[in-house]
Image (cartoon, grey):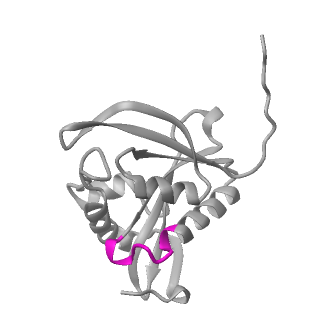
């Protein structure tokens, strides 16, 4: 299915989106893309972890086709300038620019919310996602070696970040 770019709407998630978002998670977060498949035990469990307005949703002609979720990585005040994100696009709609538009919208949303940095985690066995993130301004910040065992082999978890604006650097040399 080819999507005409003008038919795509990006908006905050709503209660009515829960089942469609759960379905996307089940299709996208598999053994190949995550430490384990993401299968929500119930709609209530999903909504507890992903309440309305905690995601930007891509909708094409009334069909939810992708999302980018955002959350604070910690509850520490000194970390409040950071959003951790996760993104998924329904396989039928992949490679049509929806992910790029979601990332762009997430950056805009984060700046409006006063955030300076987006961060995410990706498995080293997902080169397509790594290339996508790099294309969208993310850089590798770190790597947890052999962090997960997936399909019988150990894989790294890569931490990537996108800085949303210039900020002063303070290097202290002792």
Residue 69 is situated, as x and y percent measured from the top left of the image, at 47, 58
Q: Is residue 74 above or below residue 104?
A: above
Q: Is residue 164 above or below residue 145?
A: below
Q: In the image, is residue 94 part of the stretch drawn in magenta?
A: yes
Say left or right for 121 vs 166: left
Total numbered badges shown on the rendered structure: 0
Highlighted range, magenta: 90-99
The residue positioned 42% from the left and 58% from the top of the image is 128
From this viewpoint, which residue is outermost toward the top? 174
Q: In the image, is residue 101 part of the stretch drawn in magenta?
A: no
The residue positioned 61% from the left and 36% from the top of the image is 79
Quarter assignment of residue 107: bottom right
Say left or right for 46 vs 165: left
The residue positioned 61% from the left and 44% from the top of the image is 82
Q: Nearer the viewer, residue 121 or 127?
A: 127
Residue 100 is situated, as x and y percent measured from the top left of the image, at 54, 68
Q: Is residue 138 above or below residue 53?
A: above
Q: Quadrant of the C terminus?
A: top right
Residue 137 is situated, as x and y percent measured from the top left of the image, at 62, 55
Say left or right for 160 vs 27: right
Q: Quadrant of the N terminus?
A: bottom left
Quarter assignment of residue 146: top left
The residue positioned 53% from the left and 73% from the top of the image is 11
């Amino acid at each position: 299915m080819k999507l005409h770019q003008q038919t795509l709407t990006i908006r905050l998630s709503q209660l009515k989106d829960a089942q469609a978002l759960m379905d996307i998670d089940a299709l996208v977060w598999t053994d190949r893309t995550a430490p384990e498949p993401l299968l929500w035990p119930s709609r209530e469990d999903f909504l507890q972890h992903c309440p309305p307005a905690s995601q930007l949703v891509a909708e094409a002609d009334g069909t939810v086709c992708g999302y980018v979720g955002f959350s604070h990585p910690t509850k520490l005040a000194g970390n409040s300038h950071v959003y951790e994100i996760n993104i998924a696009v329904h396989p039928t709609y992949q490679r049509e620019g929806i992910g790029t538009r979601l990332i762009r919208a997430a950056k805009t949303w984060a700046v409006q919310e006063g955030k300076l940095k987006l961060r995410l985690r990706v498995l080293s066995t997902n080169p397509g996602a790594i290339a996508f993130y790099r294309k969208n301004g993310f850089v590798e910040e770190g790597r947890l070696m052999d962090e997960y065992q997936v399909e019988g082999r150990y894989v790294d978890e890569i931490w990537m970040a996108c800085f949303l604006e210039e900020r002063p650097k303070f290097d202290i040399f002792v």
